[in-house]
Image: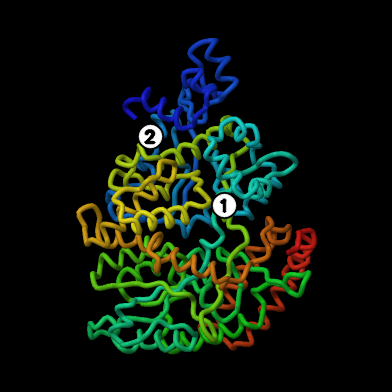
Amino acid sequence: MKNDKKLKMILLLTLSLSAITACSGQGNDKANTPASTEDAKNDAAAPDPFGKYAEPVTVTEVLGFNPPEDSRTPKGITPEQNAYFKDLKEMMNIDVKYKWTVPSGQYEQKFALAMASGDLPDILELDPKNFEKLKKQDMLADLSEAYEQYASPTLKKYMESDGGFAMKTYSSDGKQLAIPAFEDPFLSTQLLWIRKDWLDHLNLQAPKTIDELEKVAEAFVKNDPDQNSKDDTYGISLQKTLFFWGFDVRGLFNGFGAYPSIGDAQTAWLKDGDDKLKAGLIQPEVKTVLGKLQSWYQNGILNKEFALKDENKAVEDITAGRVGLVFGEWWYPNWPLNLNVDNDPKAEWIAVQIPGLDGPGKSLVPKIRAGKVFAVNKKFKNPEAAIKMINFYIEMGNKQYLEKNKAENGYVYNWFNPRIYNPAQIDTIYTEVNKTMDAKLTEIELDDENYKNVADVFKAGTDYLAGNTANASKGVNWGQYYSRAAKEGGWGTTRKIKETQAFVNNEFYGLPTITQVEKGAQLDKLMQESFTKIIMGAPIDEFDKFVASWKSLGGDQITQEVNEWYSKQPKN
């Protein structure tokens, strides 16, 4: 950003906004001070999505964070030191200050306390339930004007790619109360990740059925799959939160034809006849899976201490080579499987469709994937700053920043908020990288906001296939390539599942109902406690008691509310 003037012109040309070029790129944000009266007139007609504030604007945030995904990130870096913030300051004169940061596993509890005390930051990352709570409390700013005036053409293109459906979902009484980070629903598809080198050591094939999965898992426990002559491995990864954002057992349940949750404590809703929905959480198939998990716990296929493990402990087990089977989405090679590959050069992971009862099973996939949204505290005086920060993040993916915006330079993308992706980004990466590789080209022929992501994966893939570790470790190169572009990898396998329609939809895609907001946490706690006790040896009939309690404590009311919503939706 040393040549601020030159950078400004690049941005203006990229946006192709004639009105902005006419005013020499001077932005007239509410807090911007134009250089002259004439500039003010021009700027009023065309606010600059990348306009630099004349005076610094401080934005407060909070953050629940995971470790950087790229091992090239400088050791010891903290979220406050994220290199994105320096560029944000130089480009827009925005200072980000954290009220607090915590590891992701502590975020939900910490944020609940912040909401209860009213001590909220300026920019809010919210799940649907917290969005509903703050909307009812009239705590959210109307972003309609800020979005209309300051959203970059690229951001608007993303938000309109679904016909404006997601944006409309988070509006109320004509007010746009949040910007949804919606993505391809199939990013939620569950896969089974397997240590292929362990399969090879034991002369086993990748499992296609639950029975075959059980045999592989048992062999991974008893037959020394890592060939170190130690009894130090177990079969299937599991952590204490059974239905989470990762390292859980949604995929296992799906293989049995059970669809209790879409993750993060959100109950799944399935068709019940032609005109009703039923809660997947309380169906008989769930009881069957719990019985199987109980037997696996007793036989050592599951780690005996799973109920004490959070996601970080689960990652430690994977990284250290203690477990060879883990259910999860397309991104696992990018983290944490890449860490295992770097720790053990012989480690080889593959992705397969989840095993089912009689053959490959069907994963649960939401109809809409918008797990988080970005909103603004009504008290904040510069709501447009949130929109401009989204523009900034998208812009940093453009070609001119490729050499600068790297992990080794301190850029940690998953610590920057608010960030919005191209809803079709993952498929764009897959398509462009494979098109380039299949044509045996040496450069990506792409010149838009997707360039950096595509070029990074292409570079990682070519380096991995060539065995080149001059730029990054084997694990980093493999992780980026195998998650996003390898035809047999994470997204490649997911695309095949989509093409063969080997999935079941979660039919509820509305905002949380009144009772879900009020009773959801209580019901989730009931589920976690009941299911964990059963897995660890409580009578299987405890499931029936759970169902009765769930229904009486709010589940029946939620079912009624969900079906009231469903009755108003168009049917295929």
- For badge 1, the amino acid type reads Phe
Q: Say above or below: 116 vs 280.
A: above
Question: At numbered mark 1, what does the secondary structure look like: helix, strand or loop?
Answer: loop
- To which residue does mark 1 refer? 182
Residue 220 image-quadrant placement:
bottom left
Which residue in the structure is indicated by mark 2? Answer: 87
Q: Give the label, 1 or 2, closer to the camera.
A: 1
Q: Position of residue 333 (x, y in %)?
A: 37, 64
Residue lying at 74% horizontally and 65% vertically, measured from the top left = 558
> Up-down: is 450 above or below 204?
above
**Residue 543 image offset from top left, x and y in percent:** 63, 82
The quadrant of the picture occupied by the C terminus is bottom right
348 to the left or right of 493: left
Q: Residue at x 48, y 26 (%)?
A: 51
Residue depicted at 59% across the width and 20% down the height: 44
Q: From the viewer's perspective, is 403 left or right of 522?
A: left
Point out residue 144 in the picture as x, y percentages from the top left corner: 65, 35
Q: Position of residue 28 (x, y in %)?
A: 54, 21
**Depth order, front residue of 291/466:** 466
Which mark identifies residue 116?
none
